[in-house]
Amino acid sequence: MRRLGIFVHIIAMAGVFVWCFGGAASAEDATTAAPVVEQNTPVTVAPSVNLARVVPARTKRSSTWQRDGGNKDFFHIGPGETHVMLDVDGPGTITHIYMTLVHPDPLDYRDTVIRMYWDGEETPSVEVPVGDFFCVPFCRAKRFSSAMMAVNSGDFESDSGYNCYFPMPFASHARVELYNESDERYFGGAYAGVWYHVEYELYDAPLPGDLGRFHAQWRRENPTASVGEYADEQGPRLNTTGADNYVMLEAKGEGHVVGLFLQVDNLEGGWYGEGDDMIFIDGDTWPPSMHGTGSEEVFGGGACPKYEYAGIYSGFLLIENAHDQDWGGRNAMYRWYVQDPIRFREDIRMTIEHNHANVGENDYSSVAYWYQKEPHASFPKLLPIEQRRPRMSESQKQAYAKALELYKEFVHIRLKALYGGGEELPREMRYAAWRVGNHLNEGVKRMHVGDFDGAIMFLEKALERWKNRELPRF
């Protein structure tokens, strides 16, 4: 029997990256086979040729299309419900995951969790709040494009399309699910719905044995614990162990890290990023196998970045510069280790200082993305829903609670009007239930940027217009 040899090629052509799978191998040499080409020909030096290679695979998609041919192409995920996005036998590879929400509640991004299971395992290889998985910082979508993740714009300020391009191979089975942990809200905001595509390939022959399984894990320390002042009478504080660093990943087994998404809510003000990354590999004590020179170096920036940027492999996608202070407030950054994966054979502990020698007390959260051979070590227990949410002042919490009540009332009205249990409405009023004009849009937008008082004002106007049966303005 012939066996499919799968080779992952990263193709950089005018800033577009494509994952290609190709080449055939015998059963005896499945893990080392490569496409047979003459040496020193254009084929051997032009990776784009893989786009032309014909692969014995079947391309499939799992999506939210309406099965009876209608146009309600989204699913509802109610409070406490789990929705299965993909449940399929292998061998195969997920090649792309897309999702969108319309007028989402900002807390949707951390209240709902995406989980992925490979080959019948009992514990997930991916367990991350869904917004953080797609690099949404602090429940606030920021548009950017990169090699492995992209958040693209939609019709309204609060609407975005979320895209993940990490390949995710599976031998016998793949299961991807969304768990709405909120006990009071539908996932998906004012439409109470989620649209998604999960593209994947299926193969007739087994996967080669050297393919790791995709993993992703979320962590948070809020706030980090300062070990003391930056300096004392003897000089600057020293860090010669890394023991008090913020931990982004601990994994056991054999594999390689391919990505990192880091968020820092800078509570102290000033430049927070003097912290070095320290990566301990395969039993390292001190020094670690990889020791950096500052946070901005990890993410490809110049000294102390205060302007946002998004690159193919690295970026600072959020720099608030809040409170009229450089680097004040919320900051978010990503790094894709595509050209330089961080490999480990036994274990890895991936850390970063919270400011030099861990003197900073700020809110750190992160997602690490990696491949490894199974089984994987147990993940830390995911924080309770209240401890996952971004920090808010007491006044913000009160204003948000009021805005949320108005928002929930509107969602309830819309659900009853559109999906049963409500009054019979003429066609034009049913359409009004979908869009009640600029007030709703502006209210949701203000929720997403933290202006909850402004959100209250516009949501109250939206509800008043709906209850008075005023048709929307466009």
Image (cartoon, grey):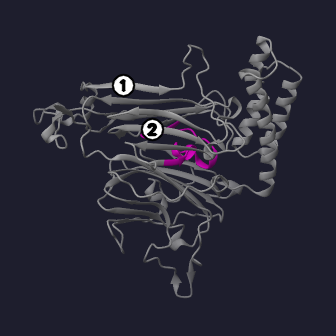
Question: What residue is drawn where x is 35% and y is 39%?
Answer: 170
Specify whether residue 312 is in view.
no
Which of the 4 quarters of the picture holds residue 436?
Answer: top right
Instruction: Check the picture and name the quadrant holding the C terminus.
Output: top right
Q: Position of residue 12 (x, y in %)?
A: 34, 36
Q: Label 1 belongs to which residue?
A: 59
In this view, the residue farthest toward the top is 427
Question: What residue is drawn where x is 60% and y is 41%?
Answer: 141
**Label 2: element kind:** strand
Instruction: Check the picture and name the quadrant holding the N terminus.
Output: top left
Relative to 410, 388 lies left or right:
left
**First-in-chain label (1 vs 2):** 1
Please say whether residue 131 is one of the residues in the magenta stretch.
yes
Question: Up-down: is 474 above or below 24?
Answer: above
Specify whether residue 390 is in view.
yes
Q: Label 2 belongs to which residue?
A: 175
Q: Residue 164 versus residue 255: which sits nearer the camera?
A: 255
The count of marks equals 2
Magenta part of the protein: which range?
127-151
**Foreground: disc 1 or disc 2:** 2
Q: Tag 1: residue type?
A: Thr
Q: Position of residue 203 (x, y in %)?
A: 29, 30
Relative to 441, 30 lies left or right:
left
Relative to 313, 428 lies left or right:
right
Q: Position of residue 122 (x, y in %)?
A: 44, 48
Please say whether residue 163 is one of the residues in the magenta stretch.
no
Which of the 4 quarters of the picture holds residue 351?
Answer: bottom left
